[in-house]
Amino acid sequence: MCEVNVNQFLESTYLKTPIQAGISPEATKKIVEELIHEAVNNKFKLVMIRPDYVSLAKEMIANLDSYTSVGTVIGFHEGTYSTEEKIAEAEKAIADGVDELDFVANYEAFKNGKINLVKSEIFKCTKLVLDNNKVAKWIIEIAALNDEEIIEITQLIRDVVLDNFGEEKALKVFVKSSTGFYKTEGNKPNGATFEGMKLIIENAKPLPTKAAGGVKSFKDALKMIEIGVRRIGTSSALAIADGNIAKEGY
């Protein structure tokens, strides 16, 4: 693993709305444009932005003659949107040219025992993505779940995907740890942990996995890759790539 190109596992991420960041829409657009340039210049795997910026990102990346992919989030960040709302949001992003779509699973419904609702949204949204030859990722928000729940919802996603789309297409459906926006108590981690990712990896196979939130150093990124993570979502991609430790960010 010492020869691994960490940059090709990194999804350089900015997901704050102007209101969340306390800045103007114009300033937000500038941050997104800078993120895109940074991702292209460093050959990061993907730039992950809000749906409103997908068209901008695709146009910029095409003009820069880059292979950097564009990803966006759906049902973000609470996950409680209806399946119909998630599908409508995803359809627009696909029309705008997005390559990968990270859906927030309705983990609250899952915790409340509404398993059929969760199975239905996993099936319908994944089908839409695969039918359009895109990549889907399902965010389970591990900070909101105990270990048993992490295992159960990961297995649920795995089984829905394998039963309906087969093992070959399953390689285009990830299980992802976190939004990075979940509010925890007592400074507990709100993103990926090594323990949490091991549970996801073990129970998602053959589906690939994405660690998001909390990976802030090259050393931690390399360790995530070594345990089997295939993507890392971070707002600190440049710091990680440069071998530094990020002090802030997702």
Image: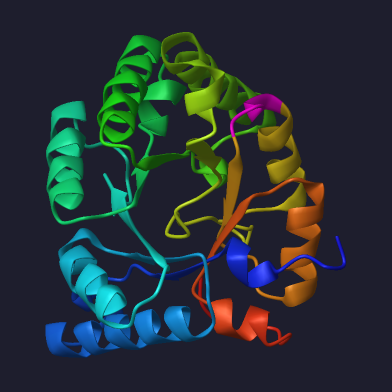
The reply, left or right, for residue 229 in relation to residue 158 is right
Give 14 or 35, whichever is nearer the viewer.
35
Give the answer, above or below, for where 67 lies relative to 32.
above
| Residue 237 shows up from this direction | yes
Of the 4 image quadrants, the one containing the N terminus is: bottom right
Give the answer, above or below, for where 56 lies relative to 196.
below
The reply, left or right, for residue 163 in relation to residue 50 is right
**Magenta portion: prevailing SS class:** loop
Which residue does the image show at 19% across and 30% down from the upper left? 82
| Residue 246 shows up from this direction | no
- Residue 194 image point, x, y percent: 76, 51
Give the answer, above or below, for where 137 lies relative to 7.
above
The reply, left or right, for residue 29 in relation to residue 237 is left
Q: Which residues are magenta?
A: 203-207
Give 11 or 115, whichever is nearer the viewer.
11
Q: Residue furthest front?
A: 65
Give 103 or 151, whichever is nearer the viewer.
103
Residue 142 position by quadrant:
top right
Give the answer, above or below, for where 153 lies relative to 173.
above
Which residue does the image show at 74% across and 30% down from the upper left? 202
Q: Is residue 76 magenta?
A: no
Q: Is residue 206 magenta?
A: yes
